[in-house]
Image (spheres, rainbow, N blue to C red):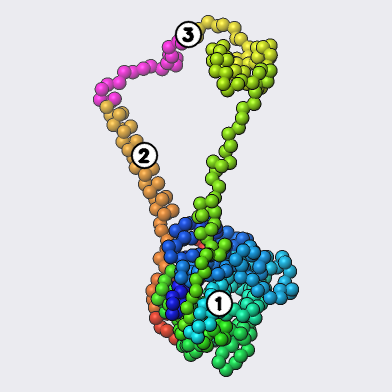
């Protein structure tokens, strides 16, 4: 989010397996936050982490030093505010319980930074950026749809409260909803597309040049109202990004006055890789007036990066040795008395010794390896030479017979070894024969790929074959065909 004397840039994106924006949001935990990521030269950063699930979600905002915010705050409800450099202006949240507010903010999905800007007319204003990673509504978990809609409601209350307080507001990040059919690759195949609760919420939040229903404007559609195939998210499993078969989930929303008066451009960067999302950005015709000092939420003030974190040696305090029971304490300056005691023998420990009678009754370790009773001595056993059975005669063998017998035994051993090796070879070949060849899809006559059902239900865990090509529009012959085949259980 660099700021210069003439323009103000906003950029939002995802990074890695976790969600990140620049106004960034890496979804990691604080205990794995490294200094190279937290402390970047020329930037001041602010992080919000999930308190409920490790590595589940999170957001972060990086500001250039020329756009240092005057305030920063974690969460939308104000429950995690520190009262030191917070943004404030929370609105009426009476419809939420304290427990619900804490639950909505516990996943680290919102981060606010407030900046002081100057318009082209020379007017000083405040601009509040709300960096969000809105929840995803899993079809198999209806409670997550409720969570998502409550988060939307809380976000709208906070944003409108900031507007009423006189601040400009930008909401940017992953809203996890494709607003219009033009924002989805296959909206016609979705049942009741317009009736989706998330889309209805966006209808009430947003406005356009002709309709002032909401307080905010989708900046990309403001500049590109009819641009098709403008997507920001694609399925990685199906390789849909190769054919641009995705949806637009990432937005930069600005309040109506701010977008109309100061926005110069709003754009997507689909060529930038890094995750299943691409960056989105906007350029504002305002200048930023940086604060002299970073807010308290800045990562450079965290103990692990500010050099104030306690080390383990601070907890290891030397203990004073207590005097030995029954003896006077030794004075550290009385060296002669200490030397005399060392000559006499070691100083007895504080634990009282057992009586000598008790020590005599203690068994030796070797006593456990000796017989508990003594056996009478017996005369040594005399081994007698073994004699052949009565009635048998030993006939001496000739040298030729011995040689033949040796050869026969060796050949028998060789054949036995070969038989064992052949049996083992056949066994391992049957076990390690490798996977069976993939079936060919009917559309392209190409080898398929195997997938596993992960959706809860009767087919959970079953494997199947589909076309290996990336997913795309049904009319595109180069895209994945409709081939499907269940895998036979092994």
| Magenta highlight range | 383-402
Residue on which the image places disc 3: 382
The answer to whether the residue labelled 2 contacts the one labelled 1, judged by CB atoms less than 8 Å apart, is no
Q: Residue at x 41, y 58 (%)?
A: 434
> Are there few (<14), some (14-19), or many (20+) residues within 10 Å of tag 1?
many
- The structure residue drawn at horizontal position 58% and vertical position 34%, both measured from the top left corner, is 318
Main secondary-structure element of the magenta-colored stretch: loop
Q: Position of residue 292 (x, y in %)?
A: 51, 67
Q: In this picture, is 441 found above or below 16? A: below
Q: Label 2, on which residue?
A: 416
**Foreground tag (2 vs 1):** 1
Q: What residue is pinned by disc 1?
A: 127
Residue 26 highlighted magenta (yes or no): no
User: Which residue occupies the foreground of this view, 134 or 320?
Assistant: 320
Q: CA distance from mark 2 to mark 1?
A: 87 Å
Q: Secondary structure at mark 3?
A: loop
Q: Nearer the viewer, residue 291 or 63?
A: 291
Disc 2 is placed on an element classified as helix
Q: Is residue 449 left or right of residue 99?
A: left
Under circle 1, the secondary element is strand
Give me the residue at 55% from left, 15% from top.
Answer: 336
């Amino acid at each position: 989010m660099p700021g210069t004397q003439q323009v103000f840039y906003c950029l939002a994106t995802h990074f890695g397996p976790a969600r990140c924006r620049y106004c960034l949001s890496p979804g990691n935990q604080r205990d794995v936050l490294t200094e190279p990521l937290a402390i970047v030269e020329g930037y001041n950063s602010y992080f919000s982490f999930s308190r409920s699930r490790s590595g589940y979600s999170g957001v972060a905002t990086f500001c250039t030093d020329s756009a240092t915010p005057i305030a920063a705050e974690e969460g939308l409800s104000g429950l995690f505010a520190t009262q030191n450099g917070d943004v404030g202006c929370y609105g009426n949240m009476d419809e939420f319980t304290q427990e619900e507010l804490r639950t909505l903010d516990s996943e680290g999905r919102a981060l606010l930074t407030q900046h002081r800007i100057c318009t082209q007319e020379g007017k000083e204003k405040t601009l509040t950026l709300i960096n969000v990673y809105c929840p995803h509504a899993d079809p198999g978990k209806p409670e997550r749809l409720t969570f998502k809609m409550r988060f939307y409601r809380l976000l709208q209350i906070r944003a409108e409260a900031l507007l009423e307080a006189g601040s400009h507001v930008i909401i940017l990040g992953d809203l996890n909803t494709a607003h219009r059919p033009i924002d989805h690759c296959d909206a016609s195949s979705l049942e009741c597309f317009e009736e989706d609760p998330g889309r209805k919420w966006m209808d009430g939040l947003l406005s356009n040049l002709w309709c002032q229903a909401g307080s905010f404007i989708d900046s990309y559609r403001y500049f590109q109202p009819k641009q098709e195939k403008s997507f920001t998210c694609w399925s990685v499993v199906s390789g849909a990004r190769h054919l641009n078969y995705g949806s637009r989930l990432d937005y930069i929303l600005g309040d109506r006055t701010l977008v109309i008066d100061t926005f110069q451009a709003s754009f997507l960067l689909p060529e930038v890789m890094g995750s299943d999302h691409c960056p989105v950005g906007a350029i504002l015709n305002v200048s930023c007036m940086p604060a002299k000092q970073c807010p308290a939420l800045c990562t450079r003030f965290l103990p692990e990066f500010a050099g104030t974190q306690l080390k383990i040696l601070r907890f290891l305090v030397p203990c004073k040795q207590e005097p030995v029971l029954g003896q006077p304490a030794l004075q550290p300056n009385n060296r002669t008395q200490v030397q005399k005691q060392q000559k006499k023998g070691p100083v007895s420990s504080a634990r009282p010794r057992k009586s000598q009678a008790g020590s005599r009754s203690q068994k030796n370790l070797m006593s456990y390896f000796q017989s508990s009773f003594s056996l009478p001595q017996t005369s040594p056993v005399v081994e007698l030479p073994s004699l052949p059975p009565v009635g048998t005669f030993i006939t001496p063998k000739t040298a030729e017979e011995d040689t033949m017998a040796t050869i026969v035994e060796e050949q028998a051993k060789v054949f036995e070894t070969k038989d064992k090796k052949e049996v083992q070879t056949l066994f391992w070949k049957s076990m390690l024969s490798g996977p069976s060849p993939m079936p060919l899809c009917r559309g392209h006559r190409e080898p398929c790929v195997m997938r596993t059902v992960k959706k809860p239900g009767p087919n959970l865990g079953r494997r199947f074959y589909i076309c290996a090509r990336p997913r795309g529009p049904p009319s595109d012959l180069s895209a994945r065909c409709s081939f499907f085949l269940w895998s036979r259980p092994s």
